[in-house]
Image: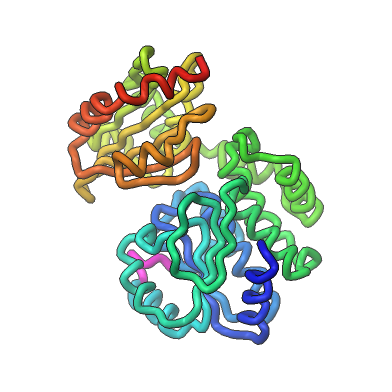
Amino acid sequence: MNKDTLETVKTLLNQPKKVVVVGHKNPDGDAVGSCLGLAYFLKGRGHDTQVIMPNDFPEFLKWIPGCADILTFDRHQKQVTQAIEEAALIFTLDFNALNRTGDLAEVLEKATVPFVMIDHHQQPDDYAVAVYSDVSMSSTAQMVFHFIEGLDGVNEISHEIATQLYVGIMTDTGSFRFPATTATTHKVIASLIEKGAQNSIIHQNIYDTNSQDRLKLLGVALNNLHVLPEYRTAYISLSQKDLDDHNFKKGDTEGFVNYALSLKGVVFAVIFIENRQESITKISFRSKGSFSVNEFARTHFNGGGHTNAAGGRTEMPLQKAVTHFISILPPYKNALNHDA
C-alpha cells in the first residue's frame, strides 16, 4: 500500500464512524475471512462495523468467528440497504468491480460516501477514493494483514482476527501451494499463529467436513472428466440433475477443478456447472505456468480473476457451453503447449 493511499485511509478513519465491509457474490474463504478480519480490527478501534455479502456462503465457512453477524442481501435486503444508506464509509474486499456483487451492485452504486478497495485481482474499476490493489498478493486476507500493519495495528490482532485472516490466506493459496504463496505469506501466517490462529483445527474445519453426498458428487465429477491431450486440457461437467441427485449445497464443488489440473501433462483445467435457477452455466478455470485463464475468461466467458485461477459464466446450456469451449481452443494450442 503506497503512502498516499495510507494517508487517505488514515484520514477517513480518524474518528469513529459507521463502516460497511462488502464481499463479492458467492463468497469464498478469502472474501469471508478478509471481510470479517477487517471488520473486527476496525471495531476494535471504535468503529461501528457491518459485514455484508450479496448472498449466502458455504456451510464449511460458517464456524468462523463473526459469521453469524454477516448480513446477506438475498435474505436481508431491507437491513442491508439501510446499513449502506447509513454508512459513512464502505470497504469493498476481494473484488474490484461493483458488478461482482450481483443485485447488490444497484444499492452500492447509489451510495455517495467514500469507497476503499482492497483486492488482488487484475484490472480494477475506478470507483474508490483509496485503492490498495496488488495482483502479486496471495489473497485479500494477506492484504488486510498488511493494511493493518500500515495502520500500526498488528498488536491489535486478536485470536479471532488471526483465525479469520488465516482462513482467507489458506483457502486462496490452496493450503499454501499456489505460486503467489511467497516467503512473506509464510511470515504473515507465522504471525497469525502467534496471535492465536490454530492452524490444524482451521484446516480440519475447512477440509475435513465432507458429507457422503459431496464425496459421491466428486465421484460423478471424476467420471465426467475428459482430457484433450492435443491442448493439454481437461474439463469436467456437472448437470443440474447431477447436483440435485446429490443434495447439492453451496460450496460442494469447491476444489473439484483441481483434480483435473492434477493430471500429468495437463496445464489447463475447467469445470462447467449447470445452474438452471439462474439459467446459466458457471465455469471455473485453472492453469499451470504462463497460460492466463484470466484473459481467457474475460475474452470468452464474461469472467476474470488471476493468471492461474479465474471464473466465468455463460447463458448457453451446459452441453452447448462445453462444445463452444472446445471449438475456441485451436488458436490457443501453441500457448498451451509452450512449456511442453
**SS assignment for the magenta stretch, majority:** loop
Q: Magenta span has 266?
A: no
Front-most of residues 228 and 163: 228
Horizontal and vertical percent for residue 300? 29, 39
User: How many tags in the picture?
Assistant: 0
How is this picture coloured?
Answer: rainbow
Q: What is the span of residues highlighted in magenta in the rendered image? A: 69-76
Give the quarter of the figure containing the N terminus: bottom right
Give how far across and how far down residue 162 sits, in percent. 70, 57
Q: Residue at x 47, y 38 (%)?
A: 309
Rendering coords of residue 313 (x, y %): 29, 44
Locate residue 306 relative to residue 17 in the image: left or right: left
Q: x, y percentage for residue 19?
A: 54, 77
Rendered residue at 39%/27% (across/down): 216
Viewer-proximal residue among 88 and 165: 88
Residue at x 30% of width, y 41% of height: 301
Which of 58 and 80 lies nearest the eye of the viewer?
80
Quick check: 227 above or below 33? above
Q: Quadrant of residue 165?
A: bottom right
Left or right of residue 202: residue 317: left
Residue 237, above or below 33 = above
Left or right of 193, for residue 177? left
